[in-house]
Amino acid sequence: MNEREPTTKQVIAFTVLLSFIASILGTILTIGVLGPVLGWDQDGQGVPMIFNKPRQLEKIIEKETIERVERADELVVKVVESASPAVVSIVATKDVPVIEKFFVDPFAGDPFFKQFFGEGGSGFQVPQFRQKGTEKREVSSGTGFIVSKDGLTITNKHVVSDANAEFTAFLNDGSKRNVKVLARDPLHDLAVLKIDGEGYSPLLMGDSTGVKIGQTVVAIGNALGEFRNTVSVGVVSGLQRTVVASSGNAEPETLQELIQTDAAINLGNSGGPLINIRGEVIGVNTAVASGAENIGFAIPVNQAKTALQSVQKSGKIIYPFLGVRYTVITRERAEKEKLPKDYGVLVSDGPNGEAAIVAGSPADKAGIKKGDIILEIQNERIDQTHSLSSILQKYHVGDEIALKIFRDGKEIELKAALTERKI
């Protein structure tokens, strides 16, 4: 019996059936095989993640942000753990009078009042005071940080300014050591100490010329003279600041080229380190702005390194001295005040009326005048990253230096022989 040829309707029906079966199989394969590859959404919507990119990117960004914050926290923790053993509290003690209060009857023994009150006196008592010996008391405190294995330590001059006091260092482990003041800086609010003992883990001193506004910093110190090794974190919020600082009964002192930070610096933090995220000291905390919140100042560490090297070499801090007072010129200031140059320093009177030129100084002898703009020293340009004092510190007492001066619309060159700055 001969087989019949399939009709057209049968062919179409068979084709449709095959297409339906293929579609079902394709869906199964997509879900089972390609779903994991495409990152199939598991929220029940049945939508591949490739079609849901905004939500996926939001989760990725959130995760990366959290990871960055955690990494930053870990860096700060490591810096603190590494630095804290080298940060010490400096406490000053001295013999102070012990004052005793007592009372006396001003009328006792007086013949006139005796007839009214008798031998026992009037009973009226007047307080009196007298010294009853002396005793050692803590009179001030601050912070310092160890910079050598044999106990050389940096702090502020005003922390150890009392020549009649005795100083003690309290270490992070609670032990205490005797302290000897090796030198007090005549130019900056710095001092170099020697702590008894050996084998210390010193802090690494960095390079303050590379400090940038916005970089993260950590301050460690003896806050309020009570809370030792208190940590605060912030950023560098300004550079090349000038402030007039005072402490106790000391004369106000003008400090220049300071690093400004919003890391909280409290009373007692003076002399402590300002540290970058690599664990390097970039400044010595020295002052806070009164009436403001979180505006503190630190002396650039390069000044402290110069002082330390001088003590190690000569036993005292010696600076080459030029003898000018000045203000730093910036582009903004040059535009505002219509200055002829946008770099250098303008020779001018001090903030308290001090003369611009120190009488008898190398600057005086060289012919520098108030109103001059000092542009260069030995062909090195003076600007915000290369300050006059930092350039001078490269030279020694007795060196003759060439200065490029702008005066009366033209540049001239003067020469000055540096002398030692006197205390």
Image (cartoon, rainbow, N blue to C red):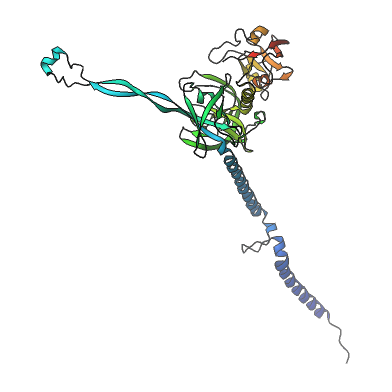
Quadrant of the frame with the C terminus:
top right
User: With respect to residue 189, does 412 lie above or below?
Assistant: above
User: With respect to residue 216, does 355 lie above or below?
Assistant: above
Residue 145, quarter of the rendered image:
top right
Looking at the image, the residue that sits furthest to the bottom is 1
Query: Relative to residue 112, is residue 328 drawn left or right?
Result: right
Residue visible at 74% across and 18% down in the picture:
379
Residue visible at 65% across and 10% down in the picture:
362
Query: Relative to residue 224, is residue 29 drawn left or right?
Result: right
Residue visible at 78% across and 78% down in the picture:
13
**393 or 383: nearer the eye?**
393
Residue 418 percent across, percent down from the top left:
67, 13
Examine the rendering and report whether any part of residue 189 can be seen.
no
Residue 166 percent across, percent down from the top left:
47, 26
Residue 278 percent across, percent down from the top left:
64, 38
Residue 337, quarter of the rendered image:
top right
Residue 125 percent across, percent down from the top left:
21, 21
Residue visible at 62% across and 48% down in the picture:
67
Quadrant of the frame with the N terminus:
bottom right
Looking at the image, the residue that sits furthest to the right is 2
